[in-house]
Image: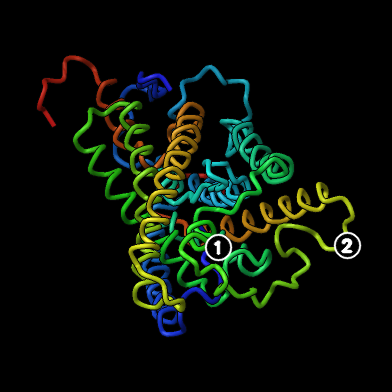
Amino acid sequence: MHVPDGFLDAPTSVATAAVAAGGVALALRGARRELDERTAPLAGLTAAFVFAVQMVNFPVGAGTSGHLMGGVLAAVLVGPWTAVLCMTVVLVVQALLFADGGLTALGTNVTLLGLVAIAVGWAVFRLLTAVLPTTRGSVLAAAGTAAFVSVPVAALAFVGLFAVGGVADVAVGTVAAAMGGVHVLIGLGEAAITVAVVGAVLAVRPDLVHGARALRRAALLAERPTSVPAGAR
Amino acid sequence: MSGSAQVPAPPAGSEPVSPVSGSAHVPAPHGSKPAGPARRGRGPWVAGLAVALLVAGVVSWYASASPDGLEWAAEQAGFLDTAEDSAVAASPLADYGVSGVGSERLSGGLAGVVGVLVTLLLAGGLALLLRRRGRDAAPAED
């Protein structure tokens, strides 16, 4: 879902560029808390991986395709602020080198695929991991659900922008219906890829997965000698 | 995707404070591996990069050529024609191909590999610049 130049008018594009710039500025601060010697390389690899997988459009029926957005995947792997930076780098590379996504629409794309998808997806992930038992299966279920939700939400956020600043004179309801339905299907693909990749990384290097920190704390406590009375901490 | 929480156990008594602590979360069996940053092996990193390169360089050839969700919806709703060419539409890598490379398959694969490497360098470089050092950092990681 890369918005090309021309769909949205100039004021809307300027506004989303300002929102994107603000979000990236916040992410540059927030990411400092998430990144250390061990996780920094994973951030680079995550961005590269998202770029690669975004090239592989999968069919979703009716002559339509979709591809991974990757925001939730990145957020679970490296943390939400770092994920915003990863997505921004991917979108900048795509827009500047590959003419994928418009240049004037870059702020729109960072806002939708970076900020909106990650903010909503991370909120869903945190909520689910808070209520589910602290297990690897819960992390995967939460990641998959968050990834699924993030896609139609980003699509509907585009519809909102279109309602405000769409260049074409088209009923917003028509756009919403077309965008919503197909992006629910694409969200299923997003969930499948996210669960597969997070599962693979958890199997190999669980210590690096930002979204699984609670698992490590639980494991560390479980390893304590049984003589420690319950509730001693 | 089993539900079992098989997180490698840390050495007993290690403090559950900072995820940054350099103390190994992996038990000792890899004792033959060299000490230092490569202690736990470069395997997963090399594998991760190899998968990314393979996906962008080879698997991408098999991607669906159908319009993506946004393009499709724009066509359905009747505003696809308002899309304009990007200002960099003449870029030598535009539309995931390397201009001048005859084989479409090779052209797309090379573009994917270039994109993965550029993204890795930019995002990895940025992450290394921002990373936490000093107080919390693992000891003796140069």
- Classify 10 Å Cα crowding around label 2: few (below 14), some (14-19), many (20 and above): few
Q: Which mark is residue A218?
A: none
- Classify 10 Å Cα crowding around label 1: few (below 14), some (14-19), many (20 and above): many
Residue type for callout 1: Leu
- Residues A233 and A120: in front is A120
Say which element carries label 2.
Answer: loop
Residue type for callout 2: Gly
- Residue A5 falls in which quadrant of the image? bottom right
The answer to whether tags 2 and 1 share a subunit is no
Q: Is residue A225 left or right of residue B140?
A: left
Q: Is residue A15 left or right of residue A201?
A: left
As drawn, B87 above or below A76: below
Residue A56 position within the rendered picture, expressed as x and y whole percent measured from the top left: 62, 45
Q: Which residue is mark 1?
A: A91
| Chain containing the residue with disc 1 | A
Say which element carries label 1.
Answer: helix
| Chain containing the residue with disc 2 | B
Q: Which mark is residue B100?
A: 2
In contact (CB < 8 Å): disc 2 and disc 1: no
- Residues B89 and B79: in front is B79
Q: CA distance from mark 2 to mark 1?
A: 25 Å
Residue B110 position within the rendered picture, expressed as x and y whole percent measured from the top left: 78, 51
Q: Residue at x 58, y 37 (%)?
A: B36
Residue A87 position within the rendered picture, expressed as x and y whole percent measured from the top left: 50, 58
As drawn, A105 above or below A46: below
Q: Can residue B138 be seen by looking at this rendering?
A: no
- Residues A51 and B74: in front is B74
Residue A177 position within the rendered picture, expressed as x and y whole percent measured from the top left: 37, 56
Q: Residue at x 34, y 39 (%)?
A: A145
Q: Is residue B86 left or right of residue A224?
A: right
Residue extending furthest toward the top: A226
Q: Can residue A48 be seen by looking at this rendering?
A: yes
